[in-house]
Image (spheres, rainbow, N blue to C red):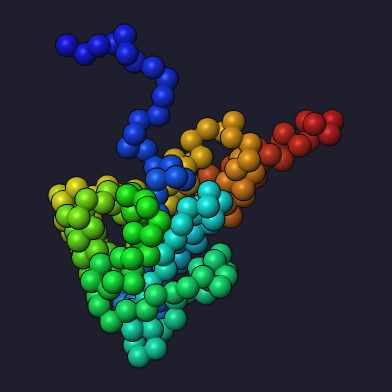
Amino acid sequence: MFDFANVKAAPGPDLLTPDNSVMLFVDHQPQMFFGAGSGDRTAVINATVGLAKAAKVFDVPVVLTTVAAESFSGPIMPQLLDVFPGHEVLDRTTMNPWEESAVVEAVKATGRKKIIISGLWTEVCIVLPALSALVQGYEVYVVADASAGASPQAHEHAIQRMISAGAVPITWLAVLLELQRDWGREKTYGPVTEVVKEHGGAYGLGLVYAQSISDAHAAG
């Protein structure tokens, strides 16, 4: 029988926190975007930048990786480097980032066990490292809206394949708000709301409106 006497107000151990997570950005590159057909590419870019800014607000370590940048896929999208200026980008020949020792070592060096992964394409360069990391004991969270596949079916089937293996699907905004989790955390309250206003669509506009009303009342 469940012991309700032990129930208390406390976060569950499975929640993402700034101290237990690492973000892996995979192949957000021009050639990969050209072939992405699972959804609106502008929305994927917006979600990716929102996710990157979430990492920066909470000082979550990030690993940036590309595939065949010089010979085929082009450079990592500049919006990511704008968020992480000067950050090392690990280029690979492997479609599976988890078969590139530099990528694996970069993740290991963080000491984190929860990998928040996003990138292109879902059915290749995301599903392969997700399955590889899961079998080695990592917990994998796939940011579905900051990722894209060659077709809607390819993206969805890859997500389902990863779920079956134990990965958790999530969205960039859910990551941001789970890392914040309490609006009483004043240190990150302002930066988080700025990210939401910039990248949160209608929710962001709602914050702009709410703050304008609050400012008007304060001035009045």
Quadrant in which residue 153 is drawn: bottom left
Relative horizontal placement of residue 126, taking residue 197 as reference (left or right): left
Q: Please state which of residues 79 and 95 is positioned toward the viewer in this rendering.
A: 95
> From what the image shows, is residue 166 above or below residue 47?
above
Considering only vertical position in the picture, is 20 above or below 29? above
Q: Quadrant of the C terminus?
A: top right
Q: Nearer the viewer, residue 180 or 155?
A: 180
Q: Which x, y percent locates residue 96?
A: 24, 71
Above or below, comparing residue 36 to residue 9 in the picture: below
Relative horizontal placement of residue 85, taking residue 41 as reference (left or right):
right
| Residue under the image location 42 percent in, 68 percent down | 64
Side (left or right) of 155 relative to 11: left
Q: In this orientation, which residue lies closer to the viewer: 76 or 5?
A: 5
Toward the top, the furthest residue is 5
Instruction: Please indicate whether residue 71 sits to the left or right of residue 163 in the image.
Output: right
Residue 189 location (% of width, % of height): 61, 40
- Residue 114 visible in the picture: yes
Within the image, what quadrant is residue 37 found in? bottom left
**Picture coordinates of residue 182 (x, y %)?**
52, 32
Assign the N terminus to one quadrant of the image: top left
In the picture as drawn, the residue positioned furthest to the bottom comes out as 71
What's the residue at 40%, 45% (across, down)? 20
Q: For residue 122, say whether it is visible.
A: no
Residue at image coords 34%, 15%: 7
State the residue lying farthest toward the right. 220
Q: Residue at x 59, y 55 (%)?
A: 198
Circle count: 0
- Please tell me in which quadrant of the rendered image residue 29 appears: bottom left
Q: Position of residue 195 (x, y in %)?
A: 57, 52
